[in-house]
Image: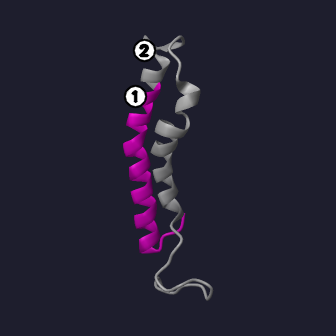
Amino acid sequence: MRNQTSPGRPPGSRKRPALLWLLLPYVLFLAVLPLVNRVTPTVLGLPFLFFWTLLATLATPLAVWLARRGDRARGRGCRG
């Protein structure tokens, strides 16, 4: 049954580890920013900071898709 919770948890609370994927954009855009704030190494002709921002922007929809996919799979009771 999906609505059963463990005895120590309040009713309605569930662990949803797939939603941890939503932390990826935060980490890529904000937490790592002081480390990648460089201009001199160029990647594909772009300054490194611009390349990093482009990479983080492209990774954000992927992280949201992975979080949605994992959360929906958990809702259906699938394991894996």
Q: Quadrant of the C terminus?
A: bottom right
- Regarding residue 44, the answer to whether it shows in the image is no
In the image, residue 11 above or below residue 14:
below
Q: Which residues are magenta?
A: 52-80
Query: Residue 23: where, in percent of width, then height?
Result: 50, 50
Foreground: 15 or 50?
A: 50
In the image, residue 19 above or below residue 54:
below
In this figure, which residue is indicated by the disc labeled 1?
54
Query: Residue 15: where, in percent of width, then height?
Result: 54, 71
In this figure, which residue is indicated by the disc labeled 2?
46
- Regarding residue 70, the answer to whether it shows in the image is yes
Circle 2/circle 1 CB separation < 8 Å: yes
In the image, residue 29 above or below residue 70:
above
Query: Residue 20: where, in percent of width, then height?
Result: 52, 56
Under mark 2, the amino acid is Leu
**Seen in the image, is 10 located left or right of residue 60?**
right
State the CA–CA distance, disc 2 to disc 1.
10 Å
